[in-house]
Image (tube, grey):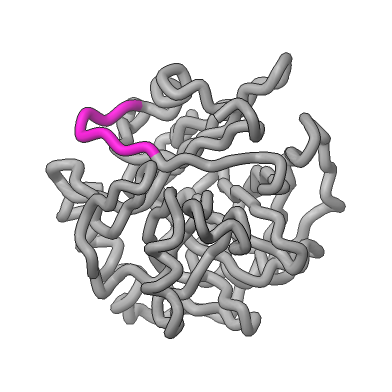
Amino acid sequence: MKPNFLFLLVACLIFFTSPVKGEEKFSSNSLPWQTLSSGLQFCRLEVLSPNNPQNILTILRLEMNLWSARVFFDREPRTIKEWQQKTGASVICNGGFYREDYEPAGRIISNGLFLGPAKNRHMKGMFLSEPKRGFENLPKTVLIDLKDDQSAELITAYEQGIQSFPILLDSKGQVRVNPSSFQANRTALAQDEKGYLYILVTEKPYFTLYDFGHYLKSLPLGLRFVLNLDGGSRTQLAVQFKAFRYLFSGLESKSDTTRLFFPQPQKLPSVIGFFPRGNS
C-alpha cells in the first residue's frame, strides 16, 4: 500500500472521529463447509444486515500440522493469480501493508530472512509459521500480540512471518479496534481454540473493521485471535486444489465496491502461500 493510502488507513482506522451509530447487527446462515483435502475446508457464507447490502464472507480453515505456510516478498509486485502461478501454492492470500516503493511497512520473515523495519508502532500483531530447528516444540503456526512479553523471542524462532494491524479480536475475546464509518473489503487471519488457522476474505466492501471484529466473534467458530491484513483492492485470495478453483482479485462489478477502488487487480509485493506438507 502506498504511503498516502497507508496514512489514510491509519487515520481512518485509529483517529476517525465522525459520529458512528451503534454496533451493526449481522446474521448468517449455517456454515456450509466443503472439504477440499485433509486439513483444508472451504465455505462462502452469506452475511445479512438490515442496514447494508448483502455481503459474502469466504473462509478457509487449515489444520497446520498438515499444511505448511510460506511468506513471499518481491519488489516487483504481482497479482494474486500471478503469485500462485509462480509459487505453486494451493492457497495464497494477500499479505500486510507496504509503502510506495513496495517495501514492507512492518516486519516480514521469508524463509528465515528478516525484511522491513524491525519496529513500526502501527503494527499490532504477527502471523508466525514454521518453527526453526531446535524449536520443534512450538506450534506450527501462531498469531501473536506484539505487546506480549514473549513476542520478540517468538519472532526469532520461526522461519516465516508477517506483521500487520489492527488486532480485531484478542485472546481475551475483546474487539481491539475503535468504531468508524470506513468500509472496505477485508482480509484477516484467525485461530480458534483448537489451533486451526482461518483465512477470512469479504467479497464486498460493507464491513467496518469494528463491525467485522464483532461479526467474527459471533460466528460459531470459537475464534480466539483475529489479525487484520491489508484490505480494499488488496484483498485477494486464490485457491487451486485438484479440480477446485476459487479466485477473488479484489474487484467487483459495481463501481462503488470500495473507496479505494481500482479498475484492475492490484499487484502485491507480499503474499502468504499454503502447501500440503511434504510438497512445500
Q: Position of residue 118 (x, y in %)?
A: 23, 65
Q: Find residue 216 and report its horizontal and vertical position in percent.
A: 66, 64
Q: Residue at x 19, y 46 (%)?
A: 103
- Give 54 or 130, whichever is nearer the viewer: 130
- Residue appearing at x 49%, y 52% in the figure: 133
The x and y percentages for residue 104 are 24, 50
Q: Is residue 74 magenta?
A: yes
Magenta span covers which residues?
72-78
Choose top left, top right, bottom left or bottom right for residue 124: bottom left
The image shows residue 227, relative to residue 35, as above or below, that is below
Indicate left or right for 150 with 50 as reference. Answer: left
Q: Residue at x 55, y 30 (%)?
A: 280
Could one spot residue 279 in this view of the protein? yes
Report the residue that reaches farthest toward the front. Answer: 134
* Above or below for 205 versus 18: above
Determine the main secondary structure of the stretch shown in magenta.
Answer: strand
| Nearer-the-camera pick, 180 or 61 | 61
Task: Compare residues 51 and 30 and report the one nearer the observer.
Answer: 30
Residue at the limit of the structure toward the top, as seen here? 243
Which of the 4 image quadrants contains residue 171? Answer: bottom right
Q: Is residue 2 magenta?
A: no
Residue 116, compared with residue 120, is above or below; it is above
Q: Is residue 256 visible?
A: no
Left or right, 212 with respect to 77, comes to right
Q: Quadrant of residue 77?
A: top left
